[in-house]
Amino acid sequence: MTSEPLDQYTEICRDAIKGLSAKLGKTFENLLLEILLLYMAIQRKIIFTQMERYGIHCEQTYRKNFNLSRAKCINWVKFNLSLSRRYLNMDGLLAIAIDPNYISKSGKKPPHVGTFWSGCAGSMKHRLEIMGLALVDVYANNCMMLRAHQTPSTGELELRSMTLV
């Protein structure tokens, strides 16, 4: 699994991780780099058994490190901004792009599943909605994703006394 492009990708990710304010343990940092590589290498559905097959750790190691406390120790917006600084002209004209994406779902079990407006279909659709925030370099026509956030369903928003607006 060692090749020159993957080594370059690993070094880019390692530099971005070094710029994070949270201090990560060396073992977790190496595991995170391996997971980022696996996301690039695995072509189909990425599950823990697939990670075990292509990675160097067992399934339980990946499963244990995908808990909520580990996810919160990494500021992904800061990580993506450090990658953006490397590839976008930060002195040029930049814009923030907002892009709602929809995932069709047939069941009622996934969290935040609900009915959302689809501009393409011109009607309400039963699905999940993910709002993407990206940084756009206007002159170079480049874009880097900063964050993706799943929109809560209308039922969950009513419980919080909120609306989508």
Image (cartoon, grey):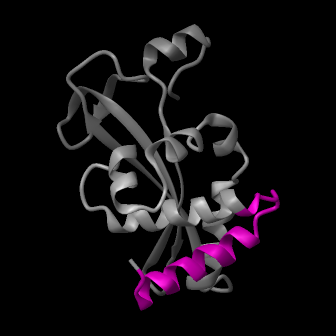
Quarter of image, res 103: top left
Picture coordinates of residue 140 (x, y %)? 46, 87
Task: Looking at this view, name the residue that lies furthest to the bottom.
Answer: 4
Quarter of image, res 160: top right
- Residue plotted at (41% across, 63% down): 38
- Residue plotted at (43% across, 91% down): 4
Task: Looking at this view, name the residue that lies furthest to the left.
Answer: 121
- Residue plotted at (76% across, 64% down): 20
Let me know if residue 88 appears in the view: no
Let me know if residue 37 appears in the view: yes
Task: Looking at this view, name the residue that lies furthest to the top.
Answer: 159
**Residue 139 part of the magenta segment:** no
**Residue 10 part of the magenta segment:** yes
Is the residue 150 above or below the residue 36 in the image? above
Q: Foreground residue, 113 or 119?
A: 113
Quarter of image, res 22: bottom right
Identify the magenta region: 2-26
Q: Tell me the chief SS of the magenta region.
A: helix
**Total of numbered circles in the picture?**
0
Picture coordinates of residue 161 (x, y %)? 61, 11
Is the residue 116 above or below the residue 15 in the image? above
Picture coordinates of residue 39 (x, y %)? 40, 61
- Residue plotted at (20% across, 23% down): 106
Q: Which image quadrant: the N terminus?
A: bottom left
Q: Foreground residue, 139 or 46?
A: 46
